[in-house]
Image (cartoon, rainbow, N blue to C red):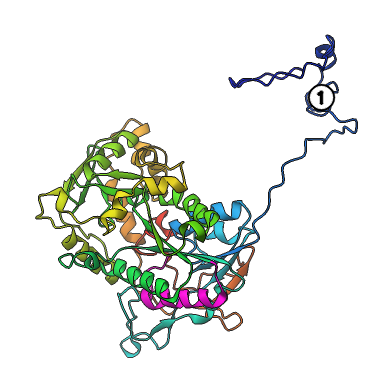
């Protein structure tokens, strides 16, 4: 049966010396699977035809390198692991636990070896006699909290590349330095570190954001010890928006079905935006493919695909979701219990983006360095040309994430309601799911002297119900709804 061509592309003409018999079409009126895709009269046909014959494929070399990744259930790391393993790289991935759909996805990936355990250790009982526990999210050295050197050393065994995004669980600076030392000792050939700026280093009048300043100091240390490295700075995640009462990016659902986003950013100052889940992975993979010859030497890359003011962000978000979204410049509202380290970060952020500043030109650049800010989105597009913008995210992904978080406005909308009702019930349900943010002394299984365990090529079947360290949120909040429980939020 002659093939039906659905393409408008020009066809290459058949060679003139090939004659196609007039009766070919009649002979070929058979079931499409009765023989090879090619006609016996086709110049592509072999005399050794079989039912399975196809043209030889071009050789596709499989990468023979292993990549070390930490906080593998976070948005950045999970995005990268998906694309890296899809093209054949092997990944050695550290995860705090195996709970949630993202952790399950990573741990059952045949190209991933999971090392389960924390990057920090508890060297002494937590606040022992008082029965209180240590808040491991505090910035800087924490009494009784050490570095899990054994797990870190094992992470880099056999690895040639590394993508590292440290978080505020444990002493981030010490952990970041230990990771860099272990990578250098293992001979890692390209070290990509997800960094952020210390604003105070760029302008003495700007306060430091504690969690970002720790990353900046780790970046300086990586440069100091001479690892072939690249530093990526990620913009604001599209995925941060939620109708749940998380501070800073809460889109507060109103009774009429509209949303209000309140934050301290100047309404007319540009901010960098990124869909971490969709776009970090392909961009980081391209950095590794280009190699240190192009991106080494401590080069910094701003990963952001849109520069939008808060007013513009609300406008495109509104177009995507099909509802009004209004921006209000105001203080960060904290309506739920949050980790101490994150609370201090928010206070510093509110000071940095001064609510009393009326000139958008005087708002400090999000990445600290104006040159880095001006490179958006050109530098990111050089790595990956298929980003998902905020409007597309709001239209295609946001309603699904909201529904996964237990919210129902999108269902009520289709039922003819305004979608603004039941929000109080959703928030009450969220408060019932809220977990204490301070870490407890959870059960850990040792493996070859590592404070953690290794899961090779599939999820460990052992029950984790007795593990108290079940929080899998990174660089953000630990309270969570159904969807947030599966992701290391803001990581």
Residue topped by disc 1? 43
Looking at the figure, which quarter contains the N terminus?
A: top right
For the record, the magenta segment spans: 165-189
Q: In the drawing, does residue 277 fall left or right of residue 92?
A: left
- Residue at the extreme bottom: 129
Q: Position of residue 168 (x, y in %)?
A: 36, 70
Q: Residues within 10 Å of mark 1 (few under 14, many from 20)?
A: few
Query: Residue 53 lies in what quarter of the image?
Result: top right
Q: Main SS of the magenta segment? A: helix
113 over 407 or under it: above or below? below
Q: Position of residue 481 (x, y in %)?
A: 38, 56
Q: Is residue 167 magenta?
A: yes
Which is nearer the eye, 169 or 77? 77
Q: Position of residue 399 (x, y in %)?
A: 38, 42
Is residue 41 visible in the rendered image? The answer is yes
- Residue at the extreme top: 22
Q: In the drawing, does residue 49 fall left or right of residue 72?
A: right
Is residue 101 visible in the rendered image? The answer is no
Q: In the drawing, does residue 69 fall left or right of residue 27?
A: left
Looking at the figure, which quarter contains the C terminus?
A: bottom left
Figure label count: 1
Q: Residue at x 36, y 71 (%)?
A: 220
Q: Residue at x 48, y 71 (%)?
A: 227
Does dot 1 land on a helix, a strand or a loop?
A: loop
Query: Residue 225 lies in what quarter of the image?
Result: bottom left
Query: Residue 130 lies in what quarter of the image?
Result: bottom left
Q: Position of residue 484 (x, y in %)?
A: 40, 56
């Amino acid at each position: 049966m002659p093939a039906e061509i659905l393409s408008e592309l020009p066809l290459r003409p058949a060679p003139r010396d090939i004659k196609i018999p007039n009766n070919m079409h009649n002979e070929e009126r058979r079931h499409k699977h009765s023989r090879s895709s090619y006609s016996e009269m086709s110049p592509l046909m072999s005399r050794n035809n079989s039912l399975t014959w196809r043209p030889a494929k071009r050789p596709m070399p499989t990468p023979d390198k292993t990549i070390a990744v930490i906080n593998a259930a976070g948005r950045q790391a999970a995005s990268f692991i998906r694309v890296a393993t899809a093209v054949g790289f092997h990944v050695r991935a550290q995860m705090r636990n195996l709970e949630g759909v993202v952790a399950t996805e990573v741990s059952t990936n045949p190209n991933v070896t999971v090392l389960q355990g924390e990057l920090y250790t508890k060297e002494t009982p937590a606040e022992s006699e008082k029965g209180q526990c240590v808040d491991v999210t505090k910035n800087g050295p924490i009494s009784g909290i050490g570095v899990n050197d054994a797990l870190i050393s094992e992470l880099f065994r056999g690895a040639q590349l590394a993508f590292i995004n440290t978080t505020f669980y444990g002493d981030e600076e010490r952990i970041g330095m230990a990771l860099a030392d272990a990578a250098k000792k293992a001979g890692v050939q390209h070290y990509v570190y997800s960094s952020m700026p210390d604003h105070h280093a760029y302008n003495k009048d700007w306060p430091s954001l504690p969690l970002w300043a720790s990353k900046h100091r780790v970046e300086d240390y990586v440069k100091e010890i001479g690892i072939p490295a690249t530093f990526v700075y990620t913009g604001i995640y599209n995925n941060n928006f939620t109708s749940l009462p998380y501070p800073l990016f809460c889109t507060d659902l109103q009774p009429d079905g509209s949303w209000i986003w309140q934050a301290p950013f100047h309404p007319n100052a540009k901010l960098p935006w990124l869909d971490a889940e969709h776009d970090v992975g392909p961009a980081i993979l391209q950095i590794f493919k280009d190699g240190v010859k192009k991106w080494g030497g401590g080069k910094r890359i701003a990963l952001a695909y849109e520069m939008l003011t808060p007013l513009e962000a609300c406008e495109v978000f509104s177009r995507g979701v099909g509802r009004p979204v209004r921006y209000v410049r105001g203080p960060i509202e904290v309506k739920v219990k949050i980790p101490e380290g994150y609370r201090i970060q928010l206070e510093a952020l509110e000071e940095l983006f001064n609510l009393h500043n009326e000139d958008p030109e005087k708002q400090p650049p999000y990445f600290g360095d104006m040159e880095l800010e001006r490179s958006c989105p050109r530098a990111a597009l050089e790595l990956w040309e298929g980003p998902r913008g905020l409007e597309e995210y709001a239209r295609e992904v946001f309603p699904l994430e909201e529904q996964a978080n237990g919210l129902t406005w999108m269902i009520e909308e289709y039922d003819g309601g305004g979608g603004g009702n039941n929000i109080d019930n959703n928030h009450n349900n969220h408060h019932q799911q809220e977990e204490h943010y301070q870490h407890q002394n959870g059960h850990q299984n040792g493996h070859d002297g590592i404070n953690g365990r290794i899961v090779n090529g599939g999820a460990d079947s052992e029950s984790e119900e007795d593990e108290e360290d079940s929080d899998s949120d990174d660089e953000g909040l630990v309270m969570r709804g159904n969807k947030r429980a599966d992701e290391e939020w803001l990581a």
